[in-house]
Amino acid sequence: MTNSPAAIESPVDRKALLAHVKRVVVKVGSAVLTTSDGLNPAAISRLAAQLSALRDRGLDVVLVSSGAVAAGRQRIRERTSKLTSKHNKCSTDLPARQAASAIGQGRLMHDYDEAFAAHGRITAQVLLTRSGLKDRERFLNARNTLERLLEWGVIPIINENDTVSVKELEFGDNDTLGAMCLGLIGADLFINLTSADGVYDRNPETNPDARPMPCIEAIAALDIEAMCDGKTSVGTGGMYSKLRAARRAAQLGVPTLIVSGRGEFDLPAVLDGQERGTLVLPEDRTVSSKKFWLAYHDDPSGAIMVDRGAASALVAKGKSLLPIGVRGVEGCFARGALVFIKTLEGDALGVGLTNFSSAELDRIKGLRTSELARAIGPVSFDEAVHRDNMLLDAAI
């Protein structure tokens, strides 16, 4: 819990803040879309009606949806009367999840197609992987495709391509994927539909006196790890991942609405200023979409440890990181890798793309730029991490 002013209700005029929204990313989780039996048709129908109402207002809408794995498992249960103990034991491992997702994607999209068609809307399935968005050219190609779909009035439905992901979840959760989509399409609002009524100052499941937070003015000031513990039983995120995604959105200058997606929720009313859920305000100082992309397109491969002088130059003066300020290296990484930038005490200052490999940095740490060529041969750059390829205070 925090007693910071960031956690106190704010007299922010929601209607005025949201009046100029033109493009929105809506993320919906498994906890909203499913029951213990699988997909909930009523929830999908209600969601389609709500998003169609936003389209009727002239808003561009992109939906980031979970539910494929749950839909696949539902389909398997429908076709299989008995499962062996071996199948039951392996039902949650990565190959089983990927197989269930492969089965469930078609089922999920079929249900969405029918639900949106009832409102005269066309949908498009877009499957993304983090490794795909890591490549700048592929990232821009995905942007161009989504722009054309929105130009045609189509509602893109995005999910992670679980079937080809090489890790348990490349994005970690669809909250992270939703935040990445903000920069991908240039959205000006992020709506995160959850099973909760919004954000509380502590976990309400373990703290009966937890207080709701209608507005979060400065999310960077919150200790979200202390506020949140545990995950939802169906999804993979929980409130921690939603707040982390909201903090990333705030850095991009995008407000976030964390509201309940259960029951008779009313998104048009929320955009008209109805005080439901939690509104997370954007930061005053925002980052470019390129810096946002480079900071969150991948997990850091290691860390560069810097001295106090370098830390001060980075934070207070916005300088690039030079080898003379480097004091140590953690991990093994190549040129161009995303790495943490940390103090000698282990505090993370931010992340950036390194111009040198870990082995090269180990050889040139503490050296002046005039001494680099003698240590590792001719180089075409002086910076260990250029300020244009660095994001301080990254939400990782």
Image (cartoon, rainbow, N blue to C red):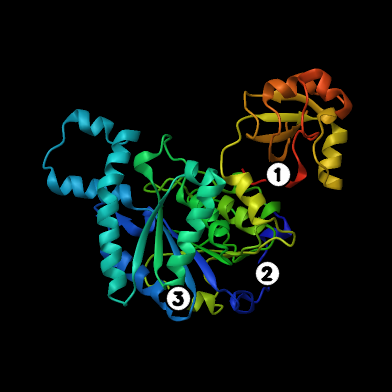
Secondary element at tag 3? helix
Q: CA distance from mark 2 to mark 1?
A: 35 Å
Q: Residues within 10 Å of mark 3 (few under 14, many from 20)?
A: some
Q: Is residue 281 left or right of residue 320?
A: left
Q: For mark 1, does the 10 Å Cα neighbourhood hold few (<14), some (14 to 19), or many (20 or more) residues?
A: some
Quarter where residue 253 is shown: bottom right
Percent position of residue 242, x then y: 53, 53
Residue pictured at 41% horizontal, 63% vertical: 156
Q: Is residue 376 found left or right of 81 in the rendered image?
A: right
Label 2 sits on residue? 10
Q: Between residue 54 and residue 92, name the one nearer to us.
A: 54
Residue at which label 1 appears:
389
Amino acid type of the residue tagged 2 in the rendering: Ser
- Quickly name the residue at label 3: 54
| Residue 146 at x, y percent in the picture | 46, 62
Front: mark 3 or 2 = 3
Rendered residue at 29%/66% (across/down): 113
Q: Residue at x 40, y 39 (%)?
A: 165
Q: State yes or no: discs 3 and 2 in contact (Cβ < 8 Å).
A: no
Give how far apart the Cα atoms at labels 1 and 3 are.
36 Å
Residue 26 picture location, percent across and down: 47, 63
Measured in 3D between alpha carbons, the distance from the residue under mark 3 to the one under mark 2, in whole angstroms, is 26 Å
